[in-house]
């Protein structure tokens, strides 16, 4: 599956939105004790088509640290996208799953 990076990607990571976070993001570790103690419900989500990919693995790892199980959403990391950015997900199925999840609150 092709992701949001164009096929002509030259490997540089100087995009102003992505590049600024590349240096610090891998070093960040959430305060899982504080998150577990939060009064709000925290739900980790993972896409069915993203199995084994970084975002999917991160969702499963964070959920494990929180003592929960991630909710599996249709499609991939951008499953809510309808192709407007060149990467199509399953926005209708994603919305239905999100509505189902929110109804449980």
Image: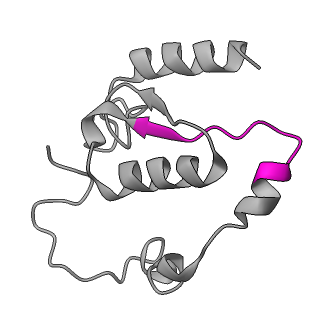
Q: Main secondary structure of the magenta part?
A: loop
Q: Residue at left 33%, top 44%?
A: 85
Q: Position of residue 104 (x, y in %)?
A: 71, 15
Residue 15, picture quadrant: bottom left
Q: Is residue 43 magenta?
A: yes
| 83 relative to 26 in the view: left or right | left
Quadrant of the frame with the C terminus:
top right
Above or below for 79 versus 56: above
The front one of 31 and 23 is 31
Q: Residue at left 51%, top 17%?
A: 97
Residue 94, picture quadrant: top left
Q: Residue furthest right?
A: 39
The front one of 23 and 42 is 42
Highlighted range, magenta: 36-46
Q: Position of residue 44 (x, y in %)?
A: 57, 41
Q: Is residue 37 magenta?
A: yes
Q: Residue at left 46%, top 47%?
A: 60
Q: Residue furthest left?
A: 8
Above or below for 27 versus 73: below
The front one of 103 and 21 is 103
The front one of 73 and 15 is 73
Q: Position of residue 16 (x, y in %)?
A: 46, 77
Q: Residue at left 34%, top 23%?
A: 90
Quadrant of the frame with the N terminus:
top left
Q: How many marks?
A: 0
For the rendered model, the colour scheme is one colour
| 89 relative to 40 in the view: left or right | left
């Amino acid at each position: 599956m092709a992701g949001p990076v164009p096929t002509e990607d030259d490997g540089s990571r100087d995009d102003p939105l992505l590049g600024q976070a590349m240096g610090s993001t891998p070093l960040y570790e959430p305060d899982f004790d504080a998150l577990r103690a939060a009064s709000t419900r925290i739900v980790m989500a993972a896409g069915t088509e993203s199995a084994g990919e970084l975002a999917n693995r991160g969702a499963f790892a964070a959920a494990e640290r929180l003592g929960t199980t991630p909710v599996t959403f249709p499609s991939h990391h951008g499953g809510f996208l309808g192709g407007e950015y060149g990467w199509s997900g399953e926005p209708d199925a994603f919305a239905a799953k999100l509505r189902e999840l929110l109804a449980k609150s």
